[in-house]
Amino acid sequence: MTSRVNPWLVLVLVCLAQFMVILDATIVNVALPTIQSDLEMTDTSLQWIVNAYTLLFGGFLLLGGRAGDLAGRKRVFLAGVVLFTAASLLCGLAQGSTWLIVTRGLQGLGAALVSPAALAIVTSTFREGAERTKALGVWSAIAVGGGAVGLVLGGVLVDVLSWPWIFFVNIPVGIATFILSLRFVPESRDDHSHRSFDIAGAVTVTIGLIALVYGIVRSAESGWGSGEVLGILAVSVILLVAFVVIEQRSAEPLVRLSIFSVRTVRGANVAMLVVAMGLFAMFYFNTLFLQRVLGYSALDAGLAFLPFTAGIIIGATLSQQLIPRLGAREVPLIGLVMAASGMLLFLRLTPDSSYWPDILPGILITSVGMGLTFVPVTLIATSGIPVDDAGLASGLFNTSQQIGGALGLALLSTFAASKTADVLAATGDKPTESESAQALVEGFQIAWLGCAVFLAAGAVLLFALLRRGDVLAVAEGETQPVVT
């Protein structure tokens, strides 16, 4: 990177693109009832507006990350921004359910190119140490806070304008990001690669991950023990095992399996997979509680999550100061204990609960805890990695989050729905409105407990898989990886 390029300007540009990606993962949620009415969609087809995005996003992340290492991170980043922006336009113009579902998938594909390339650009632009810690503090606030902002913005756009604007809003942002990034974002790539492409590896891991995510999301409707879900998951396992075999024999593998010998990479990704299982589900169930039980409008439900964004920013800022003092492993351990404790506070909620003092304390404690968690765990996952593998490390970390989020939501949705059905069955044929609300709450309580368990399990895994010495170099800004 030349001296004329301001690294903080680069950070702003890639974070702007990442903000679009994260925003679109949640902004659609509050608009679903309106979309269903306007396009006359069934409940079954409606869920695929969300699932199509998740499928393509999660399935192509590893491919997107490695493509950036080989073809150039800036080039892949710009291609992803163009695809995402164009798909957003097509989503807003959708005249039917099939059109919207297909273009949502294209959005997910664009996101899979943008997200790992953007994180790789950040890690290759900022030196390990205080500068990168600050940069990843901003990145983490965007990565988690963007989900809460999406709920607010979605509610505003649907109430004030109409649902297509939740997609149209991406267009000026995407165009501005492309033009400015074309000029100011530096190019970087794996200079040691021979530019050959591992087609067999790319096909098996991409289809395998898509099958895994598809099986997970289908489980919520068909059940984990159904032949359909078991068959899809079996195909996924076969393809992913084949991928490992292919990578072991490939001269130019898509994923250098030796990266998993780096203890920090292995530990951070396993822990983040489990943490994401709890965090992503929390947004979903809390939004349902506010709207279906307390009767909040889409806008009111979105505004209720504004403190979550503030808490993330506070936690991310504190983490930058605490990492050099306490350590890169200890800070996320504190954060995850806080987040799990905040999640347990939601177990107090009833159909008669109020925002204050019942809901807000849990939101604040959980959000600050997650802010303390994301910065150091992202540092651990991406530090001590050769620049040539920056895109791969970023793709792995993003994949852990997306797969974990999809798995956690599918599991907890199944448990919550089962509990609600059991409670309703015990009330008789025609439950009253209050009995229905109570049944929903008891189902949500199962989910909130599960979220807390996943966050606590993430802390346990982080403690078990990483020793203090493994991450000492991360806090001190050194680059030597710990290999086992």
Image (tube, helix red, strand yellow):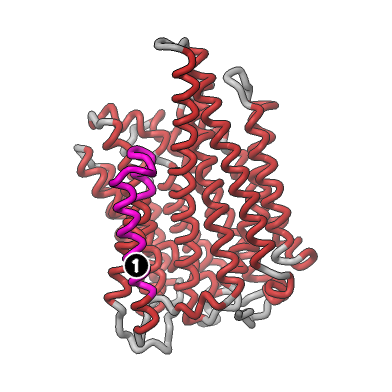
**In the shown orientation, is residue 47 left or right of residue 14?**
left
The span picked out in magenta is 215-244
**Residue receiving disc 1:** 205
Question: Does residue 440 sit above or below 133 in this rendering?
Answer: above
Query: Residue at image x 57%, y 19%?
Result: 351
Question: Does residue 174 sit above or below 42 in this rendering?
Answer: below
Which residue occupies the foreground of this view, 414 or 379? 414
Q: Residue furthest right?
A: 325
Question: Does residue 390 sit above or below 148 in this rendering?
Answer: below
- The image quarter containing residue 384 is bottom right
Rendered location of residue 411, percent (x, y)? 46, 43
Membership of 413 in magenta stretch: no
Q: Looking at the image, can residue 265 be seen?
A: yes
Rendered location of residue 293, percent (x, y)? 51, 22
- The image quarter containing residue 41 is top left
Query: Residue at image x 24%, y 48%?
Result: 102
Rendered location of residue 303, percent (x, y)? 54, 33
**In the shown orientation, is residue 418 left or right of residue 56?**
right
Query: Residue at image x 62%, y 39%?
Result: 307
